[in-house]
Structure formats: structure tokens, C-alpha cells
Image (tube, rainbow, N blue to C red):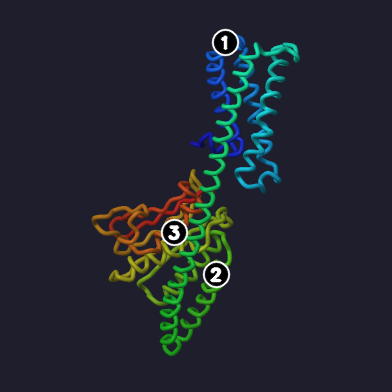
Amino acid sequence: MTSVDSLIPARWLGAARLTAGSFLLCAVAAGLLFWAAPALGTLARLFVFVECVGMVFIACIAVLGRSKRLLRMQALPRWLLTGAIAIPAGYFGGHLMALLILGEPISRVVGHESDYMVAFAFGLVLAAFVLYAAAARDQLAKEAIARSDAQRLATESELRLLRAQLEPHMLFNTLANLRSLVDEDPRQAQRMIDQLIVYLRSTHAASRDEVTTLQSEFAQLRAYLEIMCLRMGPRLAYSLDLPAELEQIAIPPMLLQPLVENAIKHGLEPKLGAGSIEVLARSVAEGIEVTVDDSGLGLPQQQPAWSGDDAGEVCGSGLANVRDRLQALYGSQASLTLQARAPCGVRAVVRIPS
């Protein structure tokens, strides 16, 4: 079922929540002001005044928050200048709006002078509180963005390190196989060289791009699996299933490669006899789901499933890196899980939002 949050743009949803919160805060403030200075008028009249002042004040903050000149300033002077403009504009602009709504003369004094000062002081305290809350929220948002960027950069650095570790190992083993095939089976050696060229080209392109397509990712997997089939012979069979409508879906590069390598290294190579790998992409309600099934040794008996917290105990850093990249790029909207298959093997499931 589609949630309300997914149907409403984040900007409008945030504005609606801010407006609703400000409305409730002003309603409470109207009640407190009526208790502190009953001579100012009825509760309903004060409610109109406080709501008008509060809404104009919030509108001023929103407008000033989009000013490029203010955004270039440091946080403290920016919020001080925002308050110096928004507080009087909100107070007098909201006061004028309330008088127009109530049909009262513009020149009419709100109440006695002492009560007027109580209302003014109360408004200043409320405005200062709102400004502090807005500044704190702005600072927390910037810190969250900075943490997210730092996590993304760290994850990408780990990916480059992992790629630097995996590619030479895979390349050396492939070249060793090639050396023996050149004399024994030149045709097979030529096939392996062709697939190695495709694989190296795709990994080189992936190292330069921040995103790729499922079509490119599957082409890289095909080249890698072809090489592994030439190395392992009849012990390895594979199938790739990518629907045409999903070919241009954007995903992070080298996202599926560690899953396939993990299946071969920890599942199929140590196993006696033949095995297989099946990679399937499909569209689901939450987005895109890619499964990597193998018929290898499977997960440890005491560990029938894995969600990412114990990667080192299961199969090293490859899956942990995939999980960290998903979390950095998509947050809780993406996931990586492992499930034991019957009678043997492992299913790795990657889910990403579309």
C-alpha cells in the first residue's frame, strides 16, 4: 500500500508539518496570553491576533531563509538579522491582519498600555523561542547532511579499496589459467581473453561513474561469470534474468559483483561437484529487487539468515561493503539480506527504491 508520505513531495510535506506545528503553538500561546492579560480581550479575539502574528512571523522566516545573500552569512549573524526583520514584521503585520479580519479600526489600541506591553513582551519571548528552534533545526539538518556525505565518501573509499584488492587477485588467477590454455586449448584461451577485455572495460567505466544501469551491471556479471566458467569448467553454470523494462534502472556501480563473487568463493569453489548461480531482477512494490541464488555450501547451520550485522563471521567484507553503500545512498529504504536455501545454497536479496 502506498503511504501518504510517498504521494506528497517532501518540501510540501515539511511545510504542512511546520504550519500545523506553528498553529498549535500559537493556540497554546493565545491561551497563556489570555491568562496573563485578560484585559486584552476575549480568548477568541486573542486567538485571531496570535495566530495572525505567528503565521506572518513564520512566513517571514521562510522567505528570508531562501535569500541567497543571507545563506552566505555565518549562522549567528544570519539568524540575528532574520530575527531583527521577522519579529517586527510578524508582530505589526500580524496585528494589522488581525484587525482587518475582525473588522476593527486600524488605529485602535489593543488595550491598556500595561497590557499592551505584556502582549509585546510575550510576543518577543515566543518569537525568540521559534527562532531558536528554527536555528537548531537548521544546524541539525546541516550536521545530518555532513554525516551522510562523510559516510558516503567513506563507503566509496572502501569500495575502491575492495576493488583494488579483488581485481588483481581475479586478474592473476585468470592470467594463470590463460597461460595453460594457450597451449592446451587456444580457442578457449581466446574466449577468455575476449571476456576479460569486456570485464576490465566495464570495471574501468564503473570506477569513474557514480551510477550505472542494471543493463551494464548485468553485462559485467556475464563477462565475469563467463571467465569463471572457463576456469571452473562444468562445475559452474549460471543464468541471468533481466526484464527489458528494468534495463535502464540506475543503481550504484559494482553493487552486484561482490554478491556473485561471494557465492563462488564461499559457496561453489569449496563444494565438491557442480553448482549454479542464478541472478534475477524484478520490480516489486517497494522498488527493485535483485536476487542472487547459488547452490553452494550454504550458510552455517547456526545462522540460517543474515541481515548485515555479522558480515565478518559469514563471508568477509564484501557483503558488509554492499550493505554500507546501500545505507549511505538510500538509508532504510534499501536492504541486503541472506537466506539459506533448501537443500543447499544461499539466496542474497538486494532491495532498492525505484
Q: Are marks 3 and 2 in contact (CB under 8 Å)?
A: no
Q: Which residue is mark 3?
A: 322
Measure how far apart labels 1 and 2 are at the Cα level.
75 Å
Q: Which comes before the other along the chain, label 3 or label 1?
A: 1
- In the displayed structure, would residue 20 be above or below residue 78? above
Point out the residue furthest to the left here: 302
Measure how far apart labels 3 and 1 are at the Cα level.
63 Å
Q: Which residue is mark 2?
A: 202
Tell me the mark number nearer the camera, choosing from 3 and 2: 3
Quarter of the rendering containing residue 166: bottom left
Q: Position of residue 274 (x, y in %)?
A: 33, 69
Q: Amino acid at mark 3?
A: Val
- In the displayed structure, would residue 349 be above or below residue 197? above
Q: Amino acid at mark 2?
A: Ser
Point out the residue furthest to the bottom here: 183
Q: For mark 2, give the secondary structure.
A: helix
Q: Which residue is mark 1?
A: 38
Q: How many marks?
A: 3
Left or right placement of residue 266 versus residue 40 in this view? left
